[in-house]
Image (spheres, rainbow, N blue to C red):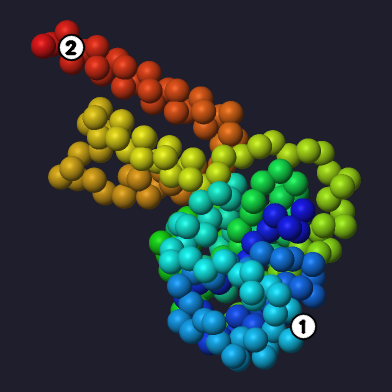
């Protein structure tokens, strides 16, 4: 299960934090380290801080965008010490670990960690299904990124020891499939006039938040795609009748 959980570090500027994160993963039995557009990597300081986890550094996956890092994942968790303006289910590290380990039995899971100074952007958090926070001192809740990764990996290890007692989870679609659904949904909503170019507002943002929160299962997403296709077929017939 832990082999299906990836730690994704976004735009990390201090190479030592990457090395320390690799060590944290290996300490707790995780093996997937993904790096999105790191500022300095590879770097000798990353190797020094990794200590006996250089093998995880050597096999780390480096990509340019967050979308690449999560395309094949069915569950994406964003970590942040601060509340956001949009409604997103909030989980502490223990709750999130239980959810991730459960679903890791039949799919890939990603946990996003943002930049050392600014964390994840709102746009990156919008790609996530859940918001993970670490219950820290309210007067100073911001942890070093490697410390945060160590704590989350520890909770994942604890949760993995209980996962065999849980029923098999339902299959969920991958992020790439969800992305295609959003494209299809927006196309149909524009064709029906629900989204008006002059007054678009934030319709798609709100719908993305809704579906990220409710998380349709794979079969349910297929049904939604079928509904959209049937609407398109009706629109095509009406267009043919008018012509």
Q: What element carries label 1?
A: helix
Label 1 Cα crowd, 10 Å radius (few <14 / some 14-19 / many 20+): some
Q: Which of marks 1 and 2 is nearer the N terminus?
A: 1
The reply, left or right, for residue 238 in relation to residue 23 is left
Residue name at image x 52 percent, y 69 percent: 62
Q: Is mark 2 on a helix, strand or loop?
A: helix
Mark linked to residue 9: none
Residue name at image x 64 percent, y 51 percent: 108
In what quadrant of the picture does the C terminus appear? top left
**Residue 213 visible to an observer of this rendering:** no
Q: List x then y, in percent, for residue 185.
A: 37, 35
The reply, left or right, for residue 48 in relation to residue 83 is right
| Nearer to the camera, 63 or 89 | 63
Residue name at image x 20 percent, y 39 percent: 196
Above or below, 166 relative to 35: above
The residue that mark 1 highlights is 52
Above or below, 66 relative to 232: below
Residue name at image x 61 percent, y 86 percent: 46
Q: List x then y, in percent, for residue 45.
A: 60, 91
The residue that mark 2 highlights is 240
| Nearer to the camera, 79 or 33 | 33
Calculate the distance from the C-alpha at mark 1 to the C-alpha at mark 2.
67 Å
Q: Which quarter of the picture shows residue 51?
A: bottom right
Above or below, 192 relative to 128: above
Q: Which quarter of the picture shows residue 21?
A: bottom right
């Amino acid at each position: 299960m832990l082999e299906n959980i990836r730690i994704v570090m976004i735009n990390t500027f201090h190479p030592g934090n990457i090395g320390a994160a690799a060590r944290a993963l290996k300490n707790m039995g995780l093996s997937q380290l993904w790096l999105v557009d790191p500022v300095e990597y590879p770097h000798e300081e990353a190797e020094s801080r990794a200590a006996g986890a250089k093998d995880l550094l050597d096999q780390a996956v480096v990509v340019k965008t967050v979308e690449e890092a999560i395309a094949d994942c069915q569950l994406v968790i964003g970590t942040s010490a601060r509340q956001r303006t949009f409604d997103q289910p909030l989980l502490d590290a223990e709750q999130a670990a239980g959810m991730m380990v459960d679903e890791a039995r039949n799919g890939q899971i990603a946990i996003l960690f943002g930049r050392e100074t600014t964390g994840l952007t709102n746009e990156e958090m919008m790609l996530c299904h859940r918001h993970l926070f670490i219950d820290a001192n309210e007067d100073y809740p911001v942890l070093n990124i490697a410390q945060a990764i160590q704590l989350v990996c520890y909770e994942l290890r604890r949760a993995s020891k209980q996962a065999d007692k849980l029923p098999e989870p339902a299959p969920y679609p991958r992020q790439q499939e969800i992305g295609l659904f959003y494209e299809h949904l927006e196309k149909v909503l524009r064709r029906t006039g629900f989204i008006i170019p002059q007054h678009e507002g934030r319709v798609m943002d709100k719908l993305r938040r809704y579906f990220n929160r409710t998380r349709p299962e794979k079969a349910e997403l297929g049904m939604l795609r079928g509904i959209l296709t049937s609407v398109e077929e009706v629109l095509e017939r009406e267009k043919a009748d008018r012509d």
